[in-house]
Image: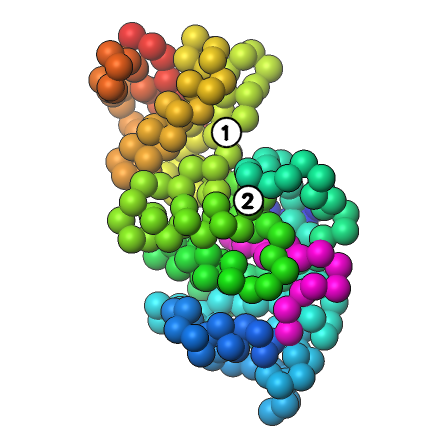
Amino acid sequence: MNGGARTTAVSLLFAEGQRPVLSSVARLADAGAGFSISHDPGDNGAIATGGTQWVELIANGLTFDMEGLAGGPPADLPASGHIFGISSDLDGARLRAVTMKPGKHLAAGATMLPVLRTLAHLAAQMTALEGLRAVAWHPARCWSEPEKFRTGITSWVEGGVFPAFSLVALAPVLDGGMQSEGLALFTGQELRLEPEVAGDAAEAGKLAVRLLHWLYERGRLTATEHLALPGRVRLRLEPSANGRFVRVWKV
């Protein structure tokens, strides 16, 4: 399940022959999904026939390119490193991608929070498309089950917790610790749980969800912090020497 560039983009993954035509996207827009089609490079019949390969969408005043719709070749299949809520029998080699990314005029601001939130929310709305098998958030190499992605992103956009494991992954490293992938897009740093914190994978996962939300709200860590969590858990957080990680120890 590997390939494709890791850019600020999200892909909708469908089984072969199941990619939506443009008219399906247009119907979703007309149903009040919070976006509209702002530019269709095809002819006047493109929405009816689904014959275009690329279309521009607008949401929250921001434009995004959507490519890979049926009627043309699929978009490149994105890299996969972390699977969330998807059946183990999902065959990535047989999936086809429809990809959305910030429009060209947003290139300089593609990592700004309003752009990231809108792109994620746009993908959450697209989970209503028939035949969708997974949603792939490129920066974290996360492939999520569509309903899990939709509920997590929708809750976040409405003021809930940061959707860990849809926009950020957590994986073990060789020394027994665990590190996030994708958080740096939002805060400039990745989270690292030291081996003493990451020993119990299930508990470490629960702890990471709390910390990812805390770091997302706080932003870049530049000095040592101490946190007291429910259950008498006390932690020390400090930036790594190179500033790329937030390292976490028990106190």
Seen in the picture, residue 113 relative to 32 is either above or below; the reply is: above
Which amino acid lies under the numbered mark 1 shown in the image of this protein? Leu
- Which label's residue is closer to the chain start, 2 or 1? 2
Seen in the picture, residue 87 relative to 4 is either above or below; the reply is: above
- Front residue of 13/217: it is 13
Residue 51 position in % (x across, y down): 69, 80
Q: CA distance from mark 2 to mark 1?
A: 13 Å
| Mark 2 residue element | strand
Question: What residue is shown at x 50% (from left), y 29% (from top)?
Answer: 170
Here the colouring is rainbow
Q: Is residue 10 magenta?
A: yes
Question: What residue is shown at x 54% (from left), y 54% (from top)?
Answer: 10
Name the side, left or right, on which 198 lies relative to 230.
right
Q: For residue 40, which numbered disc appears in the image?
A: none
- Quarter of the image for residue 31 reads bottom left
Range shown magenta:
8-21
Residue 128 position in % (x across, y down): 51, 62
Residue identifier under label 1: 170
- The reply to whether residue 215 is in sight is no
Question: What residue is shown at x 52% (from left), y 77% (from top)?
Answer: 26
Q: Residues within 10 Å of mark 2 (few under 14, many from 20)?
A: many
Q: Is residue 241 magenta?
A: no
Name the side, left or right, on which 48 lies relative to 95.
left
Residue identifier under label 2: 144
Q: Residues within 10 Å of mark 1 (few under 14, many from 20)?
A: many
CB within 8 Å, label 2 to label 1: no
Q: Quadrant of the N terminus?
A: top right
| Mark 1 residue element | strand
Please state which of the two labelled residues, at mark 2 or mark 1, is closer to the viewer. 2
